[in-house]
Image (spheres, grey):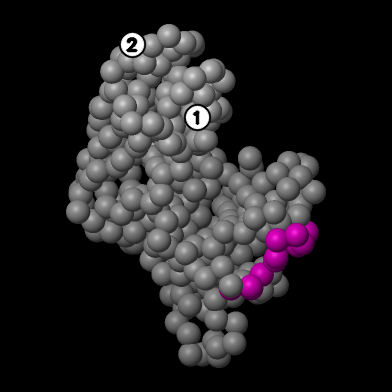
């Protein structure tokens, strides 16, 4: 696609690092623990600018 | 592969988005942007919050991480800052979704799917095209000598349609003697992703997926086929009014 940020933007977790623990409520208010709930599977963690606007 | 999506929206707003798009993965609510801050993903970490609007405060950079089974980042994918972004339904693995159109001839089948059969302006979406080649036959892909036609996929639509790169499967090498040796072929069922976005609001749009290919078997190559599958997507507004953040959205913590 033509729509990429610069790959030089180094903010946030890096390739090769363990992704930090994330525990947050989901859309139903149920607590989700990224590493526990992916259950040892590969996963995508996607940061949305906003899901609603 | 499981998908976890996070934004700074309040949980009730995420619940609406999730149900209206039929999402099958969790949308995590980082209301107040604490986790976004901790991960170092704030869009404007060094700007005085007083100088930012409600929406800009705590806004993350849009980024996706592919994690391996141990939780290590194996891939990082940045999206554009402004209005062009992946739709929650599509790039996040919501599955191919509804079958919107198809084609079948001589045992060769093509189906086009889309997760929601709708679009929002400027969101990056993807149509999924699945191609089923009957047993004993194959389709060329990649470089071929003159006289053969490799698989090609093209997306045609309104003037404001922007189509991304359509990666074709690399297939396997044809194992046979002679001048066709080493050409790449596809067999069985193949799935292609056709990324696109539409810039403007329309009540609905028609997209034509043009596919050209040539089927062969062990003894003969058939006449190349060129055909189109037409799909219709319903337009959705850019910002649904009922999804707008509350004026004091950053502190109404119903999500707990």
Within the magenta stretch, is there residue B2?
A: no
Q: Position of residue B213 (x, y in %)?
A: 34, 27
Q: Secondary structure at mark 2?
A: loop
Q: Is residue A13 left or right of residue B48?
A: right
User: Does residue B101 sit above or below B23 in this rendering?
Assistant: above
Q: Quadrant of the C terminus of chain B?
A: bottom right
Seen at 41% across and 69% down, the residue is B82
Q: Residues within 10 Å of mark 2 (few under 14, many from 20)?
A: few
Labels 2 and 1 positioned on one and the same chain: yes
**Which comes sooner in the sequence, label 2 or label 1?**
2
Point out the image quarter for the N terminus of chain B.
top right
Q: Residue at x 33, y 11 (%)?
A: B106
Please report the bounds of the magenta region as a residue range: A9-20
Q: Which residue is mark 2?
A: B106
Name of the residue lying farthest toward the front:
B178
- Residue at image location 53% in from the left, 28% down from the top: B182
Q: Which residue is mark 1?
A: B184
């Amino acid at each position: 696609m033509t729509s990429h940020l610069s790959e030089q933007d180094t903010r946030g977790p890096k390739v090769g690092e363990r992704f930090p623990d994330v525990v947050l409520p989901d859309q139903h208010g149920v607590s989700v623990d990224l590493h526990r709930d992916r259950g040892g599977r590969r996963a995508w963690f996607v940061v949305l600018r906003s899901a609603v606007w | 592969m499981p998908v976890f999506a996070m934004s700074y929206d309040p949980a009730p707003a995420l619940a609406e988005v999730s149900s209206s798009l039929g999402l099958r993965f969790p949308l995590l609510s980082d209301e107040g942007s604490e986790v976004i801050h901790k991960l170092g993903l704030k869009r404007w970490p060094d700007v005085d919050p007083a100088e930012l609007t409600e929406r800009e405060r705590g806004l993350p950079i849009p980024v996706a991480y592919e994690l391996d089974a141990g939780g290590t980042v194996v891939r990082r994918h940045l999206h554009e800052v402004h209005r062009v972004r992946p739709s929650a339904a599509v790039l996040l693995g919501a599955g191919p979704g509804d079958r919107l159109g198809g084609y079948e001839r001589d045992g060769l089948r093509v189906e086009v799917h889309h997760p929601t059969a709708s679009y929002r302006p400027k969101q990056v979406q993807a149509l999924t095209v699945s191609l089923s080649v009957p047993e004993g036959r194959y389709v060329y892909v990649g470089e071929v000598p003159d006289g053969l036609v490799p698989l090609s996929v093209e997306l045609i639509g309104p003037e404001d349609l922007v189509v991304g790169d359509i990666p074709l499967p690399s297939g396997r090498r044809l194992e046979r003697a002679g001048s066709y040796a080493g050409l790449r072929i596809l067999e069985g069922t193949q799935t292609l992703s056709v990324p696109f976005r539409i810039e403007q609001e329309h009540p609905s749009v028609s997209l034509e997926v043009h596919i050209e290919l040539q089927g062969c078997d062990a003894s003969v190559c058939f006449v190349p086929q060129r055909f189109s599958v037409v799909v219709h997507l319903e337009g959705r507004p850019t910002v649904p009014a009922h999804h707008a953040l509350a004026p004091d959205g950053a502190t109404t913590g119903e999500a707990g």
